[in-house]
Image: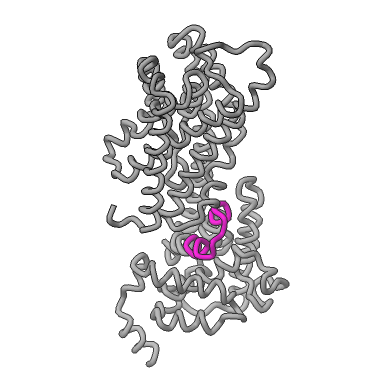
Amino acid sequence: MKNLSLKFKMYLGFLLIAAFSLLGFLWFIESRVFFLYWKDILIFGLLVFLSEQFAIDLPTRATISVSATIILAAAFSLGPLVAALATFFAVISWNDIKDRVPLYRVLFNFSQFLLSAGLAGLVYLKSGGFILIERGLKLTDFPFIFIPLLLASATYFLLNTGLTSFAIGFLEDISPLNVWLFNYKWMMPNYFMLAILAIVLAQVYAGTGVFAVVLLFAPLIIARETFQVFMKQRRAYAETIAALAKTLEAKDAYTAGHSERVSKFAELVARELKLREDRVEFVKYAALLHDIGKVGISKRILNKPGRLTDEEFAKIQEHPEIGANILKEVEFLKNIVPGVFHHHEHYNGNGYRGGLKGEEIPLEARIIAVVDCFDAMMSNRPYRKSYSKKAVLKELKFCCGTQFDETIVEALFKVLSVERSEYPLIETDEKVKEENEEK
């Protein structure tokens, strides 16, 4: 835990204190429940543990499972203490054991699960809900029972996803709100459908016991597959984009690795600018494919060692438009088309396409313009050797307000001050390069 930020350590400490305080409070008001229903706690705990074995990875260090339904069912049928104790089985999965997850993750999982389950259970009772094992649902309970159900489900969802988003935000130094919107916003409708299933599970458990609940575990597996399909589709998109980038590299050997480096630094700059996580993703993918239009340019021109003729340079200038025309035909890539089409615009209105200037140019394109130029100058090309880092940064600064957006250049400078070890060419002998330039 030595490498964790002070902000995260303080956050984790606060959550642990809050979790133990809540557990003590629930034990004080409901300790009899433990002795009456300890077998039920083990049953719900086992179901929670099984659910967590099939958790699905999300993009930013988070996971999603259907254990929420089991935990809410425990709260509805037996109360908040049982739900809180059942979450002990969700703290660590078999994969976590194999991967030897760090202690801070175990402590965080313990605290956020317990707080989410315990508080959701309390909200359920205080808003008019009742323990189903003491009396089952009756026709007269509808539609009033939906109020405590929805409030409890919303409490669990917001706490479970919100606390996790703050943890990721503090660990990655990014906006927790952006993390939440990127990872969890899409699943809200699905989550509340799982809450309806939770009350069904609770009612069945209260009436017939564990065997019927095991039979109803099948719909949870189906719900889990729905989440899995969504994430597989998301990964397929990323793999398609990577494959398109590799297509260009196969044609232009001198730009091998260029798209990946531009994408890497474009993402870092976007985060430095505090963009939303979904927009960071657009920037990253637009940067990865910013030169895809070069597949329509002759290899002879792309790899020409000498200066290009006016006609050849005019051909090169067509690549943003070619790239945009390729990408606009793919539905899931339409959001990145503006970044690709306008990445050679100049801040003062000049550039390959012309017509746009200043903040009229899409932000994604302005980011790519700066990072693309930085990487191009730092790399060897058929017609010249790479420049020194000092010369590159000086040129970027000089072109602020004419070719580049100064805000973007300053963001890149901040990124480079932290990430220079990530850029291999920065580690080269700068003195030799500067001497060559002077000559």
Would residue 149 be seen by someone viewing this image from the given angle?
yes
Q: Position of residue 382 (x, y in %)?
A: 44, 74
Left or right position of 377 against 403: left
Magenta region, main secondary structure? helix
Q: Is residue 271 magenta?
A: yes
Q: Position of residue 7 (x, y in %)?
A: 40, 57
Q: Relative to 384, say whether 226 is above or below.
A: above
Left or right position of 32 against 240: left
- Residue at 54%, 61% (x, y): give it: 274
Q: Relative to 388, say whether 241 is above or below.
A: above
Classify residue 429 by image quadrant.
Answer: bottom left
> Looking at the image, which residue sits at the far right?
355
The quadrant the C terminus occupies is: bottom left
Q: Position of residue 351 (x, y in %)?
A: 64, 75
Q: Looking at this view, is 321 or 276 the one in front?
A: 276
Q: Position of residue 290 (x, y in %)?
A: 55, 61
Q: Looking at this view, is 381 or 177 the one in front?
A: 177
Magenta range is 266-281
Left or right position of 343 against 245: right
Q: Looking at this view, is 331 or 4 the one in front?
A: 4
- Residue at 46%, 74% (x, y): give it: 413
